[in-house]
Amino acid sequence: MLTGRQVIVAAQRSSRPSQGLPVPDIADDMYDPFLEGHEHDTPRERLALRRCDSVTDEPGWLLRVVPNRFPAVRDHSTEFETLSAPSSKAVVSATGIHEVVIECPDHRRRLADLSVVEVARVLTAWQRRLQFLCESGNVQAVSIFRNEGVHAGASLSHCHSQILATRFSNRQLRQRMAIVHAFLNRRSADALCPYQQWLQSERTDTTRIVSADSDLVVVCPFASRVSWHVRFCSSNDRCGQAVSFAQVTQSVLLSLAVKLLSTARAIHDVCGSVCFNLALVLPPPEQSELFPWMLELLPRTGQLAGFELLTESDIITTAPESAAARLRDVIRWNETPDVTQLCPPEFHWR
């Protein structure tokens, strides 16, 4: 409903020989550039939660945001450069901002190993950098994501996520925008927008709902992209009136951290040590109220293969109804800590 993608549910394929094979670990280098004390191995930090008496790019931090040393785009601060291509034509590289959020100062490898407060700090760092990028006016799309495990695209095992802002709009974002704009052009006074239609249908059916309260809905969505796909979304947002992720309150961020961490741990309990992608779906910065933000947890229990590449249709082996029922059985929700724990008295964001 929200993207136009199609999904095939083929539960019988879960018996294939490749299913359930052990996940290979990322080879741990002798030297971890993200460890506290190794700040000289990263570019200069752009945001950090540090002790008040600490020095920038020195020890004394709980979380850091730094430029990616191997960026997918050229930083805004650099000039466009032309690269030599085999055709002898000039190729202009894409520009934007590519950053790494180093989520903890010690060497932990899994989201499930972090505390609720640490996960909330990661979400806060995402929010603060998103605020900066939206205010800069230089980007058309912001992608915030976390790759955990080699099958999910991670190259370093240390807990980290990434922020990639571009001066161009990607195809999937344009599809979402087109669906919403088509609704806005033909809506009647009492019509539900695509987002409201989808959320209402899920809450009415209830079979795919994992949890719902006044702030957030956790759901294994119809036409899930992957098996065990879980979506976290705001309970009250509406298209054209949505609260930007940049404006979400700290209490809601803490609640989201509780639900995210509890769900990630439940998936580890059910599926084992599975790789996964975490992706924050955002509207374009200049139209932050066009449609609501959604946080997608996408376990990599299967692999992208020829059919998916040819058709842009997904094949999953666990129906979302089955995934939601199982998660409801095994999830143990963490208690929500106090907001004051997000930034201890002796620390500050800078």
Image (cartoon, rainbow, N blue to C red):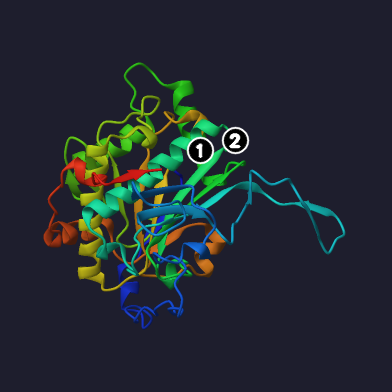
In this rendering, is residue 194 above or below 102? above
Amino acid type of the residue that numbered disc 2 sits on in the rendered structure: Asn
Q: Is residue 248 left or right of residue 285?
A: left
In this view, the residue in front, 128 or 90, is 128
In this rendering, is residue 306 above or below 208? below
Residue 196: image quadrant is top left
In this rendering, is residue 319 above or below 54? below
Q: Residue at x 59, y 35 (%)?
A: 138
Q: Is residue 4 left or right of residue 49?
A: right
In this view, the residue in front, 58 or 74, is 58
Task: For the residues labelled 2 and 1, say whether their Cβ atoms are less than 8 Å apart.
Answer: yes
Residue 319 seen anywhere in this rendered image of the structure = yes
Residue 282 seen anywhere in this rendered image of the structure = no
Amino acid type of the residue that numbered disc 1 sits on in the rendered structure: Leu
Query: Residue 174 appears at what percent x and percent y?
Result: 54, 39
**Real-space Cα distance between discs 2 and 1?**
7 Å
In this rendering, is residue 32 above or below 227? below
Q: Which residue in the rendered view is the most extreme toward the top?
A: 189
Helix, strand or loop at mark 2: loop
Helix, strand or loop at mark 1: helix
Crowdedness near tag 1: few (<14), some (14–19) or many (≥20) residues, C-alpha within 10 Å: some
Residue 79 is tagged as none
> How many labels were placed on the picture?
2
Q: Residue at x 28, y 60 (%)?
A: 319
Query: Residue 201 appears at what percent x and percent y?
Result: 26, 39
- Quadrant of the drawing holding the C terminus: top left
Q: Is residue 245 left or right of residue 338?
A: right
- Residue, disc 1: 133
- Residue, disc 2: 138
Query: Residue 335 appears at what percent x and percent y?
Result: 12, 50
- Quadrant of the drawing holding the N terminus: top left
